[in-house]
Image: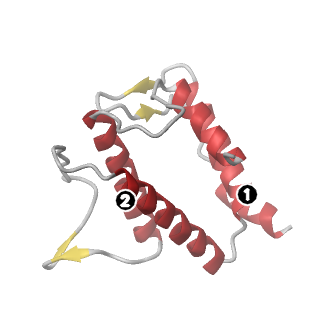
Amino acid sequence: MPTAHYDRIKSFMQKVGQDTPEGAVVPDEKTRILRAKLILEEALETVDALGVHVHIEGIEIVEEGLQYSGGGEINLQEVADGCADISVVTMGTLIAFGIDDEPLLEEVDASNLRKFGEGSYRREDGKWMKPPGWTPPDIMGAIDKGWG
């Protein structure tokens, strides 16, 4: 049984025209690359917010300039395991910071659904872009609500 958060994300994906199959499938390469970009973008943003910098052989890793290519072997079991592990690690990070998840997830999901205003559009890579005047989620308000 999917969670309410899952259902809100699925609704968002449907609104932006992304496939939301009812059973396990292997999406096309364009979709797989988009998902990889979104995961790494959010991971790097979070790592930066933790005050940590990631380097490979002395070079700091930042989102700008990263390139993605398909063609690798697809392992559905490892995709599912990796997504579950990412969820566990990110939830553990919220717990380590004493942040309640539900008010935060509700606020972020609501903010994502506000991205469908006039002037919003889909980028060539499939990512939905915010309309002019879009307001970001009230993260501190959600954190305060969780402490209330």
Determine whether the residue tagged by mark 1 lies in a helix, strand or loop. Answer: helix
Tell me which residue sits at (72%, 64%) in the image.
143
User: Is residue 134 something one can see in this rendering?
Assistant: no
- Total number of numbered labels? 2
Crowding at label 2, few (<14), some or many (≥20) Cα neighbours within 10 Å?
few
Q: Residues within 10 Å of mark 1 (few under 14, many from 20)?
A: some
- Image x and y of residue 128, in percent: 44, 32
Circle 2 sits on which residue? 78
- The answer to which image quadrant residue 15 occupies is top right
Q: Looking at this rendering, what residue extends furthest in the right direction?
A: 148
Where residue 43 sits in the image (x, y, percent)?
Answer: 41, 62
- Disc 1 and disc 2 in contact, CB within 8 angstroms: no
Q: Where's residue 58, x and y in %?
A: 15, 79
Q: Label 1 amino acid? A: Glu
Answer with left or right where residue 7 lies relative to residue 73. right
Is 86 above or below relative to 11? below
Identify residue type, mark 2: Glu
Q: Is residue 71 visible?
A: yes
Q: Which comes sooner in the sequence, label 1 or label 2?
A: 2
Which residue shows up at 49% across the image and 33% down it? Answer: 130
**Where the C terminus falls, by quadrant?**
bottom right
Disc 1 marks which residue? 102
Q: Position of residue 110 (x, y in %)?
A: 67, 40
Q: Is residue 142 left or right of residue 81?
A: right
Above or below for 125 versus 68:
above
Q: Is residue 134 above or below residue 89?
A: above
Distance of label 1 from label 2 (alpha carbons):
27 Å
Element at badge 2? helix
Viewer-proximal residue, 22 or 121? 22
- Tell me the residue at 32%/75% (across/down): 53
Q: Nearer the viewer, mark 1 or mark 2?
A: 2
Q: Is residue 72 shown above or below 49?
A: above
